[in-house]
Amino acid sequence: MVKSVVGDETRLKFAEDRLYGSSIAVEVGIIVGQLNTHSERAFVYDLIPTPPTDAGASPCSLKSEGEDRGDRKKGSKGGKPSAGATPSILIDGEWIVEHSRQVSRMLLGGMSVIGVYLWSSEGSFKATSASALSQVIMEVAQATPSFENETNGRLLIHISHSPRRWACRHCEVASIDLRPIDFKMSKLLGLLQSFRCMYGFDIRIPVFQDEVSTSNNLKTVLCRGISRHAKELQNAIALVDGKLVNGDQQVTFEGLHDVELLLPFKSDVHVEVHSSDEIDGLVVLRGAICAFAYLGPKESASQAISNIKNDIINSLRSRLDIVLDEAEDKSDTTSIDFGKGNNEILIEKPLHQQNFRELRNPLVLSFPRRVLIPWSFDICICDYLLPSETFEDLKARCREMMSIETPVESSSLLELEKEAAASTISSFWDAVRENPRSTNEELKNRGISMEKKSSGKSKSFNFGLQVAFFILLVALLTSGAITLFNPAKLVH
């Protein structure tokens, strides 16, 4: 359980100056930091204000008790609070949850959305229902899950402008109890250590007959496969800078540390324990991820490895969500080009709702590539670019989601995933042995390939036969010449 919170003084003082220098009476946003499962401390790296809604409205406002009941007191005009009434804080929970989900995708390992902050007067904060605040925190926690068995607690930071003070509370997701905890500021971001891992993956997800018959869609099966891979990844052995380190050992030397993950041999036996009759198809996720993670002061190497593994799984999930969200946003009826040529199949449902019996042709979806963006000190965040997007789209999202005011230069963006184009979802119908659903084009391509191999082997065989025949002919001629010019002597 978290008992104390340390915030980065540089970023939090910047947020404080911005708030006190503004004329706004109330503001809501999310907390970016780290909740350590093995420590009683939490780290707060920054406060990110939630942007206005699509309609341009503020995600929070002040509202008096009378207005909440629809009972305005006499003399109040235009919905303003009556004299003497202390307004409470009204929060747009759905919009904050969506903001949390978007920001969570942009954070690397060792960083996550760990709570909500509020800027208001002390009176308005006390007038706000604790259950309403806890409900928002619970929804934010549900929207930003982690595959780790992390604590269910989240933070609530209140910055009061009258009187001027900071206060931090810890909220258990399952309760409405907001427990005050110690809060202080110190140097954090400049002390974080960086870890990088180039992780190649080949995830094979079987599609069982009972799943097809119960109309499981593509998204359900893919999420299940990624979750299973997350459990396998927990058993991976990690090398840091080429050395096997003790889990409790602290990484004291500076610089960028390279991490290599070694999965147990034949860990993916999920398909092998079932007969081919039980499996109706196979989904293959294959590609490479450039994973990054950051380690806080006085933390062990095992935490750095855990952060790297967490980043890999979060990156896979984020890319899948982006692909499916993009397919859903385009239209409810989507025309998709399967394979080469002009063959198109009209899908009457969004892609993520497709049933497997409707996908009888090879389907390849390109995953978006990860781009690293300088954030603060030597720390980076990330974003994902679809094939149709440009760096300008990425910069716009950074300004909106992360409230980055300084213009991001294209030259400072890092694309380290050289094999991003290989990160695709391959056809699953043709991966099963003796599967009748293989397409004619696939069979044709295989036939051409086999014909080329057969032709090559035939040419090689014919050449070898010619050489052997020539050698035999020379031997016969030589033997005949010897017999002709050196006749054998008769035995008397």
Image (cartoon, rainbow, N blue to C red):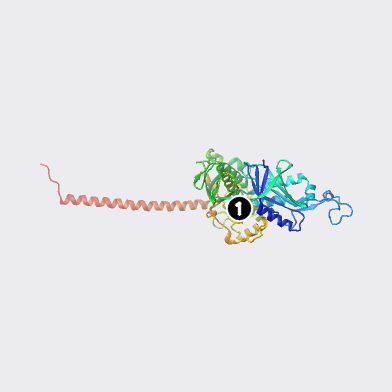
Q: Where is residue 240 in the image (x, y as percent from the top left)?
A: 52, 46
The number of numbered badges drawn on the structure is 1
Q: Nearer the viewer, residue 23 or 428?
A: 23
Kindly identify the residue that appears in the image at 21 percent across and 51 percent down.
478
Kindly identify the residue that appears in the image at 51 percent across and 48 percent down.
241
Residue placed farthest to the left in the image?
Answer: 492
Position of the C terminus by quadrant: top left
Give the class, few, some or many, for how many residues have Cα within 10 Å of label 1's Cα (few <14, many ≥20): some
Position of the N terminus by quadrant: top right
Residue 332 can be seen in this image: no
Q: Nearer the viewer, residue 203 or 400?
A: 400
Residue 227 can be seen in this image: yes
Name the residue carrying label 1. 190
Q: Where is residue 410 in the image (x, y as percent from the top left)?
A: 59, 61
Kindly identify the residue that appears in the image at 30 percent across and 52 percent down.
467
Mark 1 residue element:
helix
Q: In this view, does 406 lie to the left or right of 416?
A: right
Residue placed farthest to the right in the image?
Answer: 74
Q: Which of 285 and 91 is in front in this view?
A: 91
Q: Where is residue 302 in the image (x, y as percent from the top left)?
A: 56, 43
The amino acid type, in three-letter code, at marker 1 is Gly
Q: Where is residue 283 in the image (x, y as percent from the top left)?
A: 56, 46
Q: In this view, does 270 lie to the left or right of 83?
A: left
